Image (spheres, helix red, strand yellow):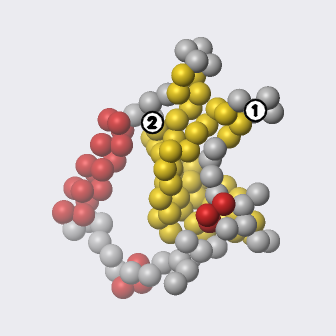
Amino acid sequence: MATTIDEITIDYSEESGQQIIKQLDKVVLSKGAWTTIMFLFAEWDRKNQKWSAPKARIDRFQKKNGVYRSQSKFKFTSVKQAEQIIEVFQNWIQSGQFIETPQDEQNPDDEN
């Protein structure tokens, strides 16, 4: 179990040693008691015996008793879906519907 953010990974291997999730990249979006990380990863395709195209997911971790535990995650299922999410955020930001307020400028969960 991870006790630091640097130790958090989504690499996963079966008991046989076969790796089935390979982390390709990791970006920490927020730090603190609640930590949010975006991962780029590939999954092992048993049928075709090769790695999948890269996928992305956002995980939310809570640090409790000194250990980070996954609390929720969202997997982007396609490039199209990721592009739609980007477009929605851009529209909200450009229209002024999604703006920072003074209390949003520093998330109380973030470490300095």
Q: In which quadrant is the N terminus drawn?
A: bottom right
The kind of secondary structure element at disc 2 is loop
Crowd around label 1: few <14 · some 14–19 · many ≥20 (10 Å): few
Name the residue rendered at 73%, 66% in the picture.
3
Q: Is 83 located above or below residue 95 in the figure?
A: above
Of the two numbered discs 1 and 2 on the same chain, state the one appearing first in sequence.
1
Indicate the position of residue 54 as horizontal and vertical percent values: 45, 36
Between 5 and 96, the residue placed more toward the observer is 5
The disc placed on residue 90 is none
Please give left or right for residue 2 compared with residue 58 in the image: right
Residue under label 2: 54
Indicate the position of residue 4 as horizontal and vertical percent values: 67, 68
Residue depth check, mark 1 versus mark 2: number of the one nearer the observer: 1
The kind of secondary structure element at disc 1 is loop
Which three-letter amino acid code belongs to the residue tagged 1? Gly
Q: Residue most toward the top?
A: 47
Residue 71 visible to the viewer: no
Residue under label 1: 17
Please give left or right for residue 89 compared with residue 55 in the image: left
- In space, the residues marked 1 and 2 are separated at their CA atoms by 21 Å
Which three-letter amino acid code belongs to the residue tagged 2? Pro
